[in-house]
Image: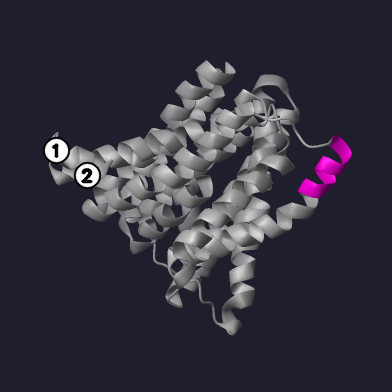
Amino acid sequence: MIKFLRGPLHIPEKREALLALTLAAMIWGANAPISKWTLQFISVETLAFIRFYFAFILFYLIFRPNLKVKKKDIPLMFLCGFIGISLHIPFLYIGLTLTGAINAAIIASSIPILSLFFSSFFLKEKISRKFVIGGMVGLFGVIFIVLEPIFEEGLSKDLLGNVFLLGSAITFIIYEVISKKLTKRNYHAKTITTYSYLIGLVTFLPFYLIDITQNGIYFMNSQALRGIFFILFFSSLVAIPLWQWGISKLEVSRVGFFLYLDPVVAFIVAFFLLGEIISHPMIIGAILIFVGLYVAENTLHFPHFHLYHSHIKKIRG
């Protein structure tokens, strides 16, 4: 795709990078509503197992020469994959079955702020006063989104779904912190991701077997197949190379803008695909999150920001 853009259209390299990042962000923005749509036709267990079965095979075949792990690092590598896949993905998928895909996109957009709080606490990374102010505003927005169902209809499954989605964000952040520890031990992101997929595959297998034993093997109708194809092909195999190439060609400050695209695309896709409508509390919460991100944006230019983008897109994919 990049060669095509560079050749016949003669688009400058930086403009190519902007286009690549835009396409990747649009794909990932659509991922939450399409995942929710797919979960209408198959179970959480089946989707999780199929996704990471094929994802692991593909990553293993591509990166097999770079997968050596020292014995002393095996426990940390396992913990990384268990938290980042085995816990994070069920929280995400169960949350999507209980509440709106738009909620997932907004809560996920707050991860940069939440992750830097965790990094400051666990990794002792320095954060500025500007970030603390922006972070507190964004955090208030997250709380507002999570508690949004109370304003609309009191205690409900949507509230529980939002709690699961928040759990998904927190487990991803813990995964991110552990991943950074592994990168400091000279493990590449592709190595960490491949083993994370393997651990997810192994831990999801028993639940998948129980599911098909109780409910039988799911008949994959055209809707389910299209959803699975999008999640596997576009989110994982198309968007990841576009994103990694794009961030290699641009300044980190310019990459930050693309954080804002994911929820916008999610709003549009969720409206047309699922009929979801943005409520007033959700708008208020989203505004608070984006204001917080804007205020804290300078602090998102740390090397840690690269790590965030390197890993979140693989997990979301």
The alpha-carbon separation of the residues under discs 2 and 1 comes to 10 Å
The residue depicted at 69 percent of the width and 27 percent of the height is 40
Give the residue type that dot 1 points to. Answer: Ile
Residue that numbered label 1 is attached to: 11
Image position, residue 234 (x, y; %): 45, 38
Kindly indicate the quadrant of the structure image that contains residue 227. top right
Nearest the viewer among 307 and 248 is: 248
Nearest the viewer among 150 and 74 is: 74
Nearest the viewer among 242 and 173 is: 242
- Please say which color scheme the image uses: one colour
Give the residue type that dot 2 points to. Answer: Lys
The residue depicted at 81 percent of the width and 48 percent of the height is 209
Does the residue at mark 2 contact the one at mark 1 (Cβ under 8 Å)? Answer: no
The residue depicted at 17 percent of the width and 45 percent of the height is 14
User: Over which residues does the magenta segment extend?
Assistant: 208-215
Against 140, residue 196 (above or below) is: below
Against 77, residue 199 (above or below) is: above
Residue that numbered label 2 is attached to: 3
Image position, residue 132 (x, y; %): 42, 53
Is 212 inside the magenta-drawn segment? yes
Nearest the viewer among 109 and 58 is: 58
Q: Can residue 200 be seen in this snapshot?
A: yes
Left/right of residue 41 with respect to residue 293 in the rendered view: right
